[in-house]
Image (cartoon, rainbow, N blue to C red):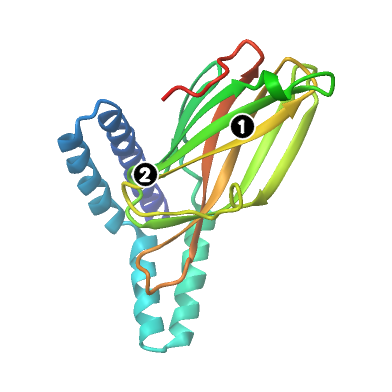
Amino acid sequence: MNSSTDRQSSTETASTNLTDLETQLTQAVTDENYELAAQLRDQIAAKKEEDPIVVLEAELRAAVEAEDYGLAAECRDKIADEIARRPPPPPTESSSGTRSSATTEGVRVDVQSIFVPQHSGVQGNMFAYQITITNVAHPTTIKLISRHWEIKDAKGRERIVDGEGVVGEQPELAPGESFTYQSSCPLQTERGTMKGHFEFYSRASTSTSWNTSFLVYVAQFGLDVAAPQAFER
């Protein structure tokens, strides 16, 4: 086996172990086992410190602070190459009816949808959804940049919605922080589905730029006139 294959195998093993740790962390938070969650978060942070991208980002910050912009450009190119050659880690997903949850790279997205009869009628049915985004394990502050939705009705008709931020905001989430918002979706049928993703940028500190982009997935959830008409608290 050559050295390139060795490096690829090592990266895949590290990614797998990191994914396992993030899955365990999500479960620990769900179980309200915060002592275990803190231990897992420390393990995840330590493992990410071994990541070549994290090392390159540190070199990039040092180069910028030293005003060595040639080296900074070289580091930036190496980061882009490293990101491009890696397959994105698969999200951990679960869905049940009008609810879903997915965790990608340590960022969890929980969704619940409801039916809104008072805004429904001959023009169609109106559904509302509530989304909570939690930085449960990503080691740095992250910023939501854009959203992408794939909405399908009961007749199989699909529409794509893309836009900046959510509800006019681009929230920033430090490790452990959450952001919750509500929005709505009209349908011409009594049932449908939604799924999509958010694009986030990350940075290591407030003194550095948003220099790493990644996607956080929203697992598919249902829109149904038989759903509850109020969000559960």
Picture residue at 46% right of the left edge, 29% below the top: 101
Q: Indicate the amino acid at tag 2.
A: Ser
Out of 3 and 63, give the one closest to the viewer. 63
Mark with earlier residue (1, 2)? 2
Across and down, in percent, residue 168 comes to 61, 52
Can residue 14 be seen at all in this image of the molecule? yes
Picture layout, residue 28 above or below residue 79: above
Q: Extreme front residue here? A: 118
Which-is-in-front pick, marks 1 and 2? Answer: 1
| Label disc, if present, on residue 15 of the rendered structure | 2
Q: Which residue is mark 1?
A: 195
Can residue 1 be seen at all in this image of the molecule? no
Q: Are marks 1 and 2 in contact (CB under 8 Å)?
A: no
Q: CA distance from mark 1 to mark 2?
A: 25 Å
Out of 121 and 214, give the one closest to the viewer. 121
Q: Extreme top residue here? A: 226
- For label 1, the SS is strand
- For label 2, the SS is helix
Q: Does 1 sit left or right of 120 as displayed?
A: left
Q: Extreme right residue here? A: 122
